[in-house]
């Protein structure tokens, strides 16, 4: 076998390997919880944010008009409103129905009922809400869209769903399970590497100034400023640690000996962001993505494979 053939075979084995359903169940259940919490967080403000007749400073029409100049085929809530108007339905009714549907598909993902339909609908409705409210979105919306996109394309249903129990569906290919998990792993590695690289290029993460700004800027100033002043000496240490965790992610998260340690460090970092800045949904979505991508290969989860499916080889 030639060297080129061996390299090609190694690449194929890297992406298409036999994988269990465990990681997909983590992703599905975690994103189901996130979709429900996301919808509940907007329960009182949904129509206020997205109704054209509302009192919001920036209306949905303005956000969608700007989006139309950049990308005409990105779905928005305006699509649903216009479709409802063609059927004689009021805007408020369509918006309320879209919120109820978002809750419904989130519960569907959580329980594993109509998994494929729920995943596609959750991705579509969440993307519509995100693009129609682009001026009030932040990182959690982007990462939820990414996670739901992977879930929508993955070989659902996994073995831990009601769909598999009620319908006795045929198990999906273990090779495609490995492919989608591998792409998610690489995607996260790139995200953390470039996030860490941009932090390292400036000096404000090394001296702790950016950390101070993040913790004292409304509405993220959960911790009293006088308490932060007492901790000011550890800000440079924490800032450097964050830089090293992120820029080292694409190396140490793949190595068997350091994977568990690096995964715990990343999970603790996001948990601290959620508690100290009040960014609970952002922290949760990053924890879910990391657990789905790497936890089944760490000591946090005992590796479980389907009968006859060998455990994928580790990178030593």
Image (tube, rainbow, N blue to C red):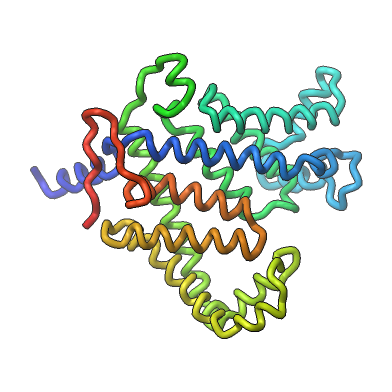
Q: Where's residue 288, x and y in %?
A: 50, 47
**Residue at 57% of width from left, 36% of height from top?**
32
Q: Where's residue 204, x and y in %?
A: 58, 80
Is residue 74 among what the camera can see? no
Left or right position of 94 against 303: right
Left or right position of 108 against 169: right
Which residue occupies the foreground of this view, 201 or 292?
A: 292
**Residue at 38% of width from left, 49% of height from top?**
295
Q: Is residue 210 above or below residue 106?
A: below
**Residue at 33% of width from left, 52% of height from top?**
299
Which residue occupies the foreground of this view, 94 or 288?
A: 288
**Residue at 48% of width from left, 22% of height from top?**
162
For the C terminus, the quadrant is: bottom left
Q: Where's residue 53, x and y in %?
A: 91, 39
Q: Where's residue 137, x and y in %?
A: 70, 52
Left or right position of 284 against 69: left
Q: Is residue 286 above or below residue 97?
A: below
Q: Residue furthest left?
A: 1
């Amino acid at each position: 076998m030639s060297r080129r053939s061996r390299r090609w075979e190694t690449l194929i084995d890297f992406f298409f390997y036999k994988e269990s359903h465990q990681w997909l169940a983590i992703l599905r259940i975690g994103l189901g919880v996130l979709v429900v919490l996301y919808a509940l967080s907007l329960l009182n403000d949904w129509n206020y944010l997205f109704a054209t007749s509302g009192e919001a400073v920036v209306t949905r029409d303005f956000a969608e008009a700007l989006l139309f100049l950049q990308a005409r085929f990105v779905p928005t809530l305006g699509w649903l409103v216009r479709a409802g108007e063609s059927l004689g339905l009021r805007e408020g009714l369509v918006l309320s129905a879209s919120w109820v549907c978002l809750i419904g598909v989130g519960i569907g993902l959580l329980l594993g009922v109509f998994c494929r339909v729920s995943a596609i609908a959750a991705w579509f409705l969440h993307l519509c809400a995100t693009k129609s409210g682009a001026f009030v979105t932040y990182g959690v919306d982007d990462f939820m869209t990414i996670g739901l996109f992977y879930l929508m394309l993955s070989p659902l249903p996994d073995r831990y769903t009601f769909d598999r129990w009620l319908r006795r569906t045929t198990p999906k290919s273990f090779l495609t399970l490995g492919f989608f998990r591998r792409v998610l792993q690489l995607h996260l590695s790139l995200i953390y590497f470039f996030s860490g690289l941009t932090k390292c290029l400036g000096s404000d993460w090394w001296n702790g100034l950016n950390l101070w700004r993040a913790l004292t800027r409304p509405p993220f100033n959960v911790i009293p400023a006088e308490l932060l002043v007492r901790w000011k000496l550890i800000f440079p240490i924490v800032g450097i640690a964050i830089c090293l965790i992120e820029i080292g992610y694409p190396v140490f998260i793949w190595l068997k000996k350091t994977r568990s340690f690096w995964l715990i460090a990343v999970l603790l970092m996001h948990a601290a962001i959620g508690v100290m800045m009040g960014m609970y949904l952002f922290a949760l979505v990053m924890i879910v993505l990391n657990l789905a991508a790497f936890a089944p290969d760490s000591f946090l989860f005992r590796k479980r494979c389907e009968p006859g499916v060998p455990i994928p080889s580790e990178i030593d």
